[in-house]
Image (cartoon, rainbow, N blue to C red):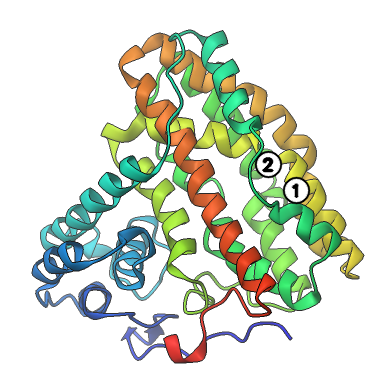
């Protein structure tokens, strides 16, 4: 059975409904403010919550609050008022959560020794990092063992980022110059369809979602996904939206592209094994060839060239790459562990 679309939350703006519910006092206050424009002490609540939380990277309330604040910047939730994007109290709350989240990632993500700040050395280091043998493979499991329900859950988990594919990394474009900027634009042009709206990767994924009988409305499954999935998206949003983290978003994209081609081939194989057609598999097929090219551009011409031009960003380039691998691995491990125990990787009804 496909996961059901969550019931609308009781928050509206001009008859537009927020498609997900709060998960605690911080996210409740943030959602109220984003919709009705009335500040309700969310910065004080966030201060207390980041002090009290055991693990901010898996904290449902704080990760949902941060996701909502980023969604305001993306314009991805129609019920959020556009004039509140730069509201000082909302930005203050975002900074409180971001600071704690970034500090946690820097503590928990293992970063390899820094290479020399040359294009060749950085590219080699990134390929070594992304090519290292990891734990159990989500893509291999989907290719060989996943059930229809599990494949559906996989697609639901992917909607958080992939229906906005490429957008977090595009924040870096105006902050780059020269070789790195040209490389990023080359990659992003492909991500956005090369001038063909029907080939925009987010649109291709939306067709996959519809073909699997799921809802392609952005945010429709936020109630279903756990904090670890929100944290993956929030990591790249934080890196992309903060100019001081330019190196991290470049490293994140490099690792993202370098670990895409083979897994997407396996995802396509698994979905077709389960009986899905080209309308579902096409998105994954597209990434097999495209990302094999992108990984070379991202490693040398983007990340490597940025390290040559701005050596002071090298540490963050490697941190961003390592963080990409770690937070995405956490999502994969969560799904595999949930399924190994005979359960669902999605949130239970009593958690909503």
Q: Is residue 173 visible?
A: no
Residue at (38, 64) in percent of width and height:
58
Q: Secondary structure at mark 2?
A: loop
Neighbor class of circle 2 (other Cα within 10 Å; few <14, some 14-19, many 20+) is some
Separation of residues labelled 1 and 2 (CA atoms): 6 Å
Front one among 68 and 1 = 1
Q: Is residue 32 visible?
A: yes
Q: Secondary structure at mark 1?
A: helix
For the residues labelled 1 and 2, say whether their Cβ atoms are less than 8 Å apart: yes
> Residue at label 1?
264
Residue 149 in which image quadrant:
bottom right
Residue at (78, 61) in percent of width and height:
142
> Residue at label 2?
260
Residue 53 in which image quadrant:
bottom left
Along the horizontal axis of the image, is 346 left or right of 315? right
Report the quarter where the N terminus lies.
bottom right
């Amino acid at each position: 059975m496909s996961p059901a679309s969550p019931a609308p939350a009781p928050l509206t703006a001009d008859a537009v409904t927020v498609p997900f519910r709060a998960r605690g006092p911080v996210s409740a206050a943030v959602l109220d403010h984003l919709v009705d424009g009335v500040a309700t002490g969310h910065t004080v609540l966030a201060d207390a919550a980041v002090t009290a939380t055991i693990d901010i990277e898996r904290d449902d309330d704080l990760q949902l609050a941060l996701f909502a604040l980023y969604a305001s910047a993306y314009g991805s939730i129609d019920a959020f008022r556009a004039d509140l994007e730069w509201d000082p109290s909302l930005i203050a709350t975002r900074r409180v959560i971001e600071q704690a989240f970034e500090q946690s990632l820097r503590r928990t993500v293992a970063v390899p020794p820094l290479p020399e700040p040359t294009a060749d050395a950085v590219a080699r280091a990134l390929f070594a990092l992304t090519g290292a043998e990891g734990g159990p493979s989500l893509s291999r499991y989907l290719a060989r063992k996943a059930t229809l329900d599990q494949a559906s859950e996989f697609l639901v988990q992917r909607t958080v980022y992939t229906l906005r594919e490429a957008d977090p990394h595009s924040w870096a474009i105006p902050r780059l110059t020269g070789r790195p900027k040209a490389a990023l634009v080359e990659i992003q042009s492909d991500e956005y369809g090369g001038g063909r709206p029907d080939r925009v990767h987010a649109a291709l994924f939306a067709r996959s979602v519809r073909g699997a009988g799921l809802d392609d409305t952005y945010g429709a499954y936020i109630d279903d996904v756990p904090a670890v999935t929100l944290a993956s998206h929030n990591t790249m949003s934080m890196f992309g939206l903060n100019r001081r983290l330019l190196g991290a978003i470049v490293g994140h994209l490099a690792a993202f592209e370098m670990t895409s081609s083979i897994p997407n081939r396996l995802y396509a194989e698994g979905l077709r094994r389960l009986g899905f057609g080209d309308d579902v598999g096409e998105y994954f097929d597209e990434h097999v060839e495209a990302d094999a090219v992108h990984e070379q551009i991202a490693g040398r011409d983007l990340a490597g060239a940025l390290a040559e031009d701005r050596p002071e960003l090298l540490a963050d380039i490697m941190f961003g790459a390592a963080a990409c691998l770690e937070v995405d691995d956490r999502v994969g491990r969560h799904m595999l562990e949930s399924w190994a125990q005979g359960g669902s990787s999605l949130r239970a009804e009593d958690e909503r």
